[in-house]
Amino acid sequence: KLQTTEDGDFDSSSLQAMTLQQYQLAVGGASENVTNTNSNHPMKGIMQGDEEDEEANSQLYKIIVPPNSVLQLQLTYQPNDLNHHTFEFPIVAAGGSKTDGLRKLVHAEALRPRMLFSTTTMDFKGRVVTSGLQSVVCVQELALHNADTSGIEWRIDTEPLKKYQGVFTIDPAHGVLQAGQDCLVRAAFLPSEPIEYKASLNVYISPPRPEGASQSAGETLPPDDSKPYLPLRFK
């Protein structure tokens, strides 16, 4: 059961787990008498124990959405192998009916990364800012590797760092890596005020080369600025 908070947001902590039997009953796939509840049944204790374990480990949830309300769900995809995944989103209205509005096909594909980063978060931790004294710069290194079969031109968009003039520096912020090559990017942090610094920098790389397209030695395509490859977070 999903409840709302005072400001109208949904409270996810109010979700109630359902047993498989309750789910089947809700969608019309089982009757309440599906389990033999005879007190003299020789398997009574075992069945009750199984039902309790099932309810404790249930991954099924009953959600009640108030009238004229919208519930937003977030689906996270974390593949562990290179594969295609397609399934119908597992949601059904109580009673077993499934309207077209509830039918959602989920498709995801795990691809081999074309460029590898040693980290996507540059965390400089807390630094002491002293007045009248020269602060010590903190430097971190980011390793890049071209895992593709062709050359890649890459670029880090440093525009968000301009609001912290002189606080963050990146060297280099762009370059070209041939297949299998590596490089190091050095990021420096020199705070000037005792405030929290945060920034997200998009990384752009060359698009995949069309199959069958010829490539001259050392030739690379320019970065595709229409779609970031990934974000780098500075904090």
Image (spheres, helix red, strand yellow):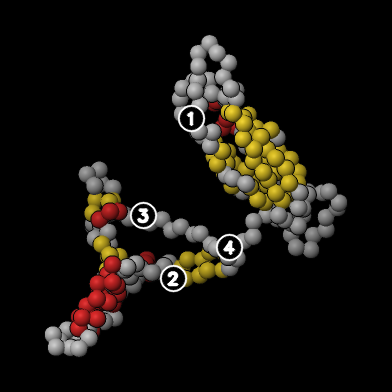
Residue 179: where, in percent of width, then height?
77, 53
* Eye-nearest disc, 1 or 2: 1
Q: How far apart are marks 2 and 4 (CA)?
A: 18 Å
**Dot 2: element:** strand
**Dot 3: element:** loop
The tag earlier along the polypeptide, 1 or 4, is 4
**Dot 4: element:** loop
Q: How far apart are marks 1 and 4 (CA)?
A: 36 Å
Residue 173: where, in percent of width, then height?
68, 36
Identity of the amino acid at label 1? Gly
The tag earlier along the polypeptide, 2 or 4, is 2
* Eye-nearest disc, 3 or 4: 4
The tag earlier along the polypeptide, 1 or 3, is 3
* Residue topped by disc 2: 88
* Residue topped by disc 1: 126
**Dot 1: element:** loop
Q: Distance between the residues labelled 3 and 4?
A: 24 Å
Residue 193 shown left or right of residue 82 in the figure: left
Identity of the amino acid at label 4? Ala
- Name the residue nearer the viewer: 31 or 43: 43
Residue 75 shown left or right of residue 64 in the figure: right
* Residue topped by disc 4: 110
Residue 3 shown left or right of residue 184 in the figure: left
The tag earlier along the polypeptide, 3 or 4, is 3
